[in-house]
Structure formats: structure tokens, C-alpha cells
Image: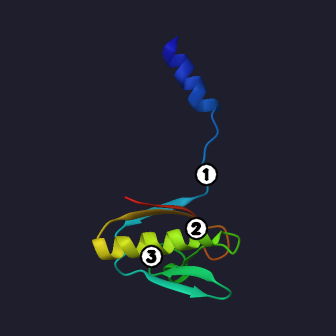
Amino acid sequence: MRSFRVLALLLLSPFTSNAADEQITGVPTNWILENSNGNTVNAYNTGTSCLSGRLRLHAGVTEEDKNRFWSTIMVAKVAGKSVTVWYDPDLDDCQLTRFRLN
């Protein structure tokens, strides 16, 4: 009975990630970060299937999120740590939906 309750909770609880999201994990050694077009942050050479491996933070993200992404990638590059990023390949420019330092 207990396992049934756990299973029911898992099935009924909302999922935080979009089913269409794809993810990549790796050390961003070759990533190129660019701040352009009205303070839009782009990452190139990410290894994704997106055009030029480009990932983009959409224009609606907060300045804090932009700074956090930039800092996370720079720390990972310098320290040789891996990051995981999730992105929606169906949106224009493969928009980032989540990221983390591993």
C-alpha cells in the first residue's frame, strides 16, 4: 500500500521540466559567451544541434539570471567543472530553460 501511495504522488506531482527540453552536460572549455542585441546573452560552440551550437537566454530573463549564467559558465571554464544546461530546441535560437554547475 505504501508503494502505491508513493507511485500515486509521483504521477500526480507536477513536473518542472518541459518534455520538449533537451540537455547537454560537459565542461564549457570551448564555449564562447556573447552579450549582444540589447543585452541578450548567447553561448556558441556548446555542442548542441542548434545552429552554430548557439544557446540563447531569452529577452525576458532577469539581469540576475543573466549574471548568474555568465558567472556559472566562467567558473566552470576556469575550474574545469562541468555544467548541465537544458534548452528548448523548438524555440527560436534554442532558448535556455535551466542550467546548473555540477
| Residue that carries the numbered disc 3 in the rendered image | 46
Residue 95 can be seen in this image:
no
Mark pair 3, 2: CA separation: 19 Å
SS of the residue at dot 3? loop
SS category of the residue bearing label 2: helix
Quarter of the image for the C terminus: give it: bottom left
Residue count near mark 1 (Cα–Cα under 10 Å), binned few <14, some 14–19, many ≥20: few
Report how far apart the C-alphas of labels 3 and 1 lie in the structure. 21 Å
Left or right position of 30 against 55: left
- Looking at the picture, does residue 102 appear above or below residue 63? above
Q: Earlier in the sequence, mark 3 or mark 1?
A: 1
Residue 19 disc label: 1
| Residue depicted at 66% across the width and 72% down the height | 58
Q: Position of residue 66 (x, y in %)?
A: 57, 73
Amino acid type of the residue tagged 1 in the rendering: Ala
Q: How many marks?
A: 3
Please identify, in this view, whether the residue under mark 3 or under mark 2 is nearer the observer. 2
In the picture provided, is 73 more to the left or to the right than 11?
left
- Considering every residue shown, the one lying at the far left of the view is 80
Query: What separation in Å lies between label 1 and label 2 (alpha carbons)?
Result: 22 Å
Which corner quadrant of the image does residue 21 belong to?
bottom right
| Crowdedness near tag 3: few (<14), some (14–19) or many (≥20) residues, C-alpha within 10 Å | many
Give whichever of 6, 38 is nearer the camera.
38
- Residue 39 in the image, given as x and y percentages of width and height: 64, 84
Q: Disc 3 or 2, which lies upstream in sequence?
A: 3
Residue lying furthest right in this view? 60
Instruction: Specify few, some or many for label 2: CA neighbours under 10 Å numbering under 14, 14-19, or 20 or more.
Output: few
Q: What residue type is labelled 2?
A: Asp
**Residue 67, image x, y percentages:** 54, 73
Work out whether mark 1 precedes mark 2 in sequence or the reverse, and give the earlier one: 1
